[in-house]
Amino acid sequence: MAGDYDLVVVANRLPVDRVEEADGTTSWRRSPGGLVTALEPVMQREDGAWIGWAGTHGEPPEPFDAVGVRCVPVGLSADEVEDYYEGFSNGTLWPLYHDVIVAPTYHRRWWEAYVRVNERFAQAAAEQAAEGATVWVQDYQLQLVPRMLRRRRPDLRIGFFNHIPFPPFEIFAQLPWRGAILDGLLGADLVGFQRPADASNFLRACRRAIALPARQSLVRLPDEGGRQVRAASFPISIDAAALDEMARREDIQERAREIRRDLGDPQYVLLGVDRLDYTKGILHRLKAFEELLSDGRIQVGEAALVQVATPSRERVEQYVQLRQDVEVTVGRINGTYAEIGKTPVQYLHHSYGREEMAALFLAADVMLVTSLRDGMNLVAKEYVASRYDERGALVLSEFTGAADELGQAIMVNPHDIDGLKDAVVRALHMSPREAARRMRAMRRRVREHDVQRWAATFLEALERPGAENTEIDLT
Ligand code: GDG
C-alpha cells in the first residue's frame, strides 16, 4: 500500500491558504511563513507531498498540486477543530510547553480527539509515502504521528521537529498522558528541537517518566531490539537573503521613511511584532514603556512604540482575555500621555504583507522581543536580516531560542521591569558605532545559518543516523 512520494511533510496546516476569488471560484495561495520557504526547494527536488489541514472544517478537498508540491488535505470536523486544535493543542500543550505562563487545561475529551486526529494524519502519510521514503513530522500538534506511522510503515525513515520549547520534566510531568506523548515521539528516528536545553529536557523526560536508558543524545528502546532514537537541536531560521534583498529595495525604504513621517517624525521608533499571544510578553513591554513615560526618561513625541499584534487563536479563552488586557493597557497609556498629534503607542491588531513588515523593521530604531518563553522567535532574526544598513538595536529576551545565537543583542529578563526599562534606554542611546558592531555580528550569524541550512542539516542528520555530532555548533 506504499504511495509515490519520497519525501512527505506532515504538518498541522497545508503550505497554502484557500482564497475566494472575485468571480466566486476558489484558489490556493502560498502561506506566509518560514516552513514553506524552507521546504519548498527540497520538496520540489525530491518529489514531495505535504499532508495538512486546509484550515476549514468539513469534508476535505481532494489532493491537488500547488507551489510545486502535492498537497493532501486532512479533514477536521467542527468538533475536532475545537477539541484537537483549540483544545488539546492550544489549551493544553501550548501553555504546558511554555512554562505554564497560563494554566493548562486537561480534558479527556480533548485528548481523545488529539489521538483520533493524529491517527488520521498518520494514515494519510502512510498512504502517500513511497517504499523507504523519508517523512518529516512538524510540531506539537502531531506528537503521536511518528509512532502511529512506524506501526503502519516500519520501512520509513521518520523525523520529527518541535517548533516550541520542550519543558523541564517537573512541568511536563503534569500531563496525564505524558507517557503516551513520549512514546509517540519515540516512533521517530530523529527528534529535533530548537535549543540543546529542549533536547536535554526531552531526554530527561524519557528517563524519568518511562524509565528508558537515555545517554548523551540517544534513547535506547530495549523493547524494539535496541533501536535508537536521536534527540538533538536544530535551531530554525529565516530566508535571510530574501529579506535582505527586500529591505534594499527603494520602494521599501521610501515606505519606511513614510512610516516615520506618519508617526510624527519622533526621534525614536520602537517596534514590537508578535502574534497576540501571552507567551510574547507584550504586557511586560507595555508596562516598561509606560513607566519610562511616567518617570520622564522618555518624552511623548520623542519616542513612539509601534506594536503589531497579529490576531491569533481568537476562540481560545486566554487569548480573548489577553486581547482585553492589552487593549485596556494601550488605552490607558495613550489616554494618559497622548497629546494632539502625538500618540505614544500605535497598536495595530492586524496582519500585514511581507513588504510592510520589512518597511516597519527598517523604520524601527529599537526592536523589542520580550517573550516570556519562545521556541526560537523568528521576528528577532527578521529584524537583523533586514538591517543591511547596520543600524538599529535589538532588545531580546533571554527566554527565546534566538538568545542562544544572537549574543550581541541587548539581553533582558522581561520579568525584571527595571532591567527592561534600562535596556530600552540603553538601546535608544547606543552609539551608531556600537550598534553597527553588534548588528554586523548578528547579521553574519543569521546569514550563515539560514532556513535553507536548517532544513538541509535536519534532513542530512535523518538520512545518516550514525553520524556523530549532528548538533549545530553555536559558536
Ligand atoms: C512558532 C514558535 C518559532 C507575524 N505577524 C505577521 C507576520 N508574522 C510573522 C513573523 C514571523 C512569524 O510570523 C512568527 O514567528 P515567531 O517565531 O516570531 O513566532 P510563532 O508564530 O509563535 O512561531 C516560535 C516558530 O514557530 C518557528 O519555529 O520561532 O518560537 O512559537 O515570521 O514575521 N508576517 C506577516 N504579517 C504579519 O502581520 N507577513
Image (cartoon, rainbow, N blue to C red):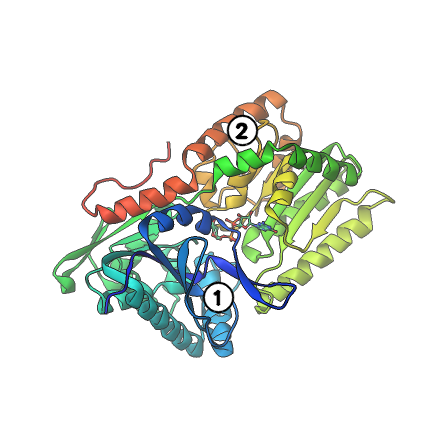
Quarter of the picture containing the C terminus is top left
What x and y, as percent, mark residue 161? 36, 53
| Residue positioned most to the top | 433
Q: Which quarter of the picture shows residue 356? A: top right
Label 1 vs 2, first from the N-terminus: 1
368 left or right of 157 in image: right
For this orientation, the residue located farthest to the front is 23
Q: CA distance from mark 1 to mark 2?
A: 39 Å
Q: Is residue 273 visible?
A: yes
Amino acid found under the numbered disc labelled 1? Ala
User: Three-letter amino acid code at disc 2?
Assistant: Met
Relative to 440, is 85 above or below?
below
Which residue is depicted at the point 48% across and 46% down?
A: 399
Name the residue located 16 percent from the left edge and 57 percent from the top edge. Answer: 227
Residue 312 located left or right of residue 80? right
Q: Percent position (x, y) of residue 231?
A: 28, 50
Q: Which residue is mark 2?
A: 439
Q: Is residue 294 above or below residue 447?
A: below
Q: Residues within 10 Å of mark 1 (few under 14, many from 20)?
A: many
| Dot 2 alpha-carbon crowd within 10 angstroms: few under 14, some 14 to 19, many 20 or more | many
Horizontal arrangement in the rendering, residue 147 relative to residue 324 (left or right): left
Circle 2 SS class? helix
For disc 1, the marked residue is 54
Picture coordinates of residue 85, whole percent (x, y): 48, 69
Q: Nearer the viewer, mark 1 or mark 2?
A: 1
Nearest the viewer among 160 and 303 is 160
